[in-house]
Amino acid sequence: MSPNRCSAADLLLPGAEHIAFDHHHSNLDQADVMAELIIRRGIQAFSERVQGKVFIPQARMDAEVGFSVENITVTFGGMEKLVEQLKSGRIRGIVNLVGCNNPKIVYEEAIVKVADELIAHDVLALTNGCAAYALLKLGFCLPEGLSCAGPGLNEALAPLQLPPVWHMGECLDNARASALFRNISTTSGLPLPSLPLAFSSPEWSNEKGIGASMGFRLLGLNSYHCIAPPIEGSEEVTRFFYEETADLLGAVMVVDPDPVALALGTAWIHLVAGEMLGADSGLGYLIIDARNFLRTDQIMAGMLLVGILGLLLNKLITIGEQVINKQWGINGQR
């Protein structure tokens, strides 16, 4: 068999042939030569395959892909119609659910569990790149996926034949999600941090994912994850990501190894933020109404109640997991 080939230094396997630009880009003029070499190596390796070791699944799955600000606007009949769905609470929030997979946790499990809980609690999900494949092949990106969604999402999306998860492209298309968020902010007249919007990369594993999450935190939107980021090599960088972005950017990084708890926490935050957006009742409305009348005591009481209810919700989830593990003899692994 021919040796492995790769074009990225961080993916270089022992014995692999490395065909790439050098760090100084001094061999850019060799691009055509290297491209031809890679193709010829591939042709050669294909003929040397051992057929008994090749398994290509025959399963196929339809999906709706390629959502953009433009076609979303047309489908809803105007961005204000989507904003109205958020104000009404039928759509409690929108999360950009993306990211590469991580070999330290079960492959694609966290992504799927987070998506399950989000749509069940009427939170619309956007996706792209590696995370999208887990959701595409399980039917999340079809209108039929609404069978697992809450009543609010069904009411908002079913008449338009839209799925509960909107595929927006490949792994560098987070800009499409941020453009949608900006349009929602502009249309509603509210700043991004006050809207029920967030970024989640449950299985992030590399610097690209860190950069993507930071891009959304720069917009004032929290990021949610099921595993710690690979930044422990620097105490200052670690402290910045875990502690300092709250004051500097108005957004934080939340890491919870339990994808169900992570998703429920996200949905809870979106519920309160959604009430702030346009409801005439609920804790979010109470806080905003108190702010308008400079009632600091009511603002603090509302914020305290949100925190207490969040802690109680987390405790109930933990107790529920312990009961299930004890009943069926499952060892909870995080």
Image (cartoon, rainbow, N blue to C red):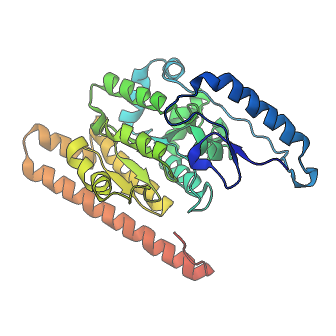
Dividing the picture into quarters, in which one does residue 160 lie? top right
> Residue at 13% across / 41% down in the picture?
291
The percent coordinates of residue 70 (x first, y second) are 50, 18
The percent coordinates of residue 23 (x first, y second) are 50, 37
Q: Describe residue 131's horizontal placement relative to residue 302 as left or right.
A: right
Q: Nearer the viewer, residue 139 or 35?
A: 35
Give the answer, above or below, for where 28 lies relative to 103: above
Q: Describe residue 25's horizontal placement relative to residue 297 as left or right.
A: right
Whether residue 93 is visible: no
Give the answer, above or below, for where 306 lies relative to 31: below
The percent coordinates of residue 308 (x first, y second) are 26, 63
> Residue at 49% across / 18% down in the picture?
77
> Residue at 63% across / 38% down in the picture?
141
Q: How many marks?
A: 0
Q: Nearer the viewer, residue 106 or 288?
A: 106
- Of all residues, the one furthest to the front in this rendering is 26
Give the answer, above or below, for where 250 lies relative to 159: below
The percent coordinates of residue 64 (x first, y second) are 65, 31
Whether residue 114 is visible: yes
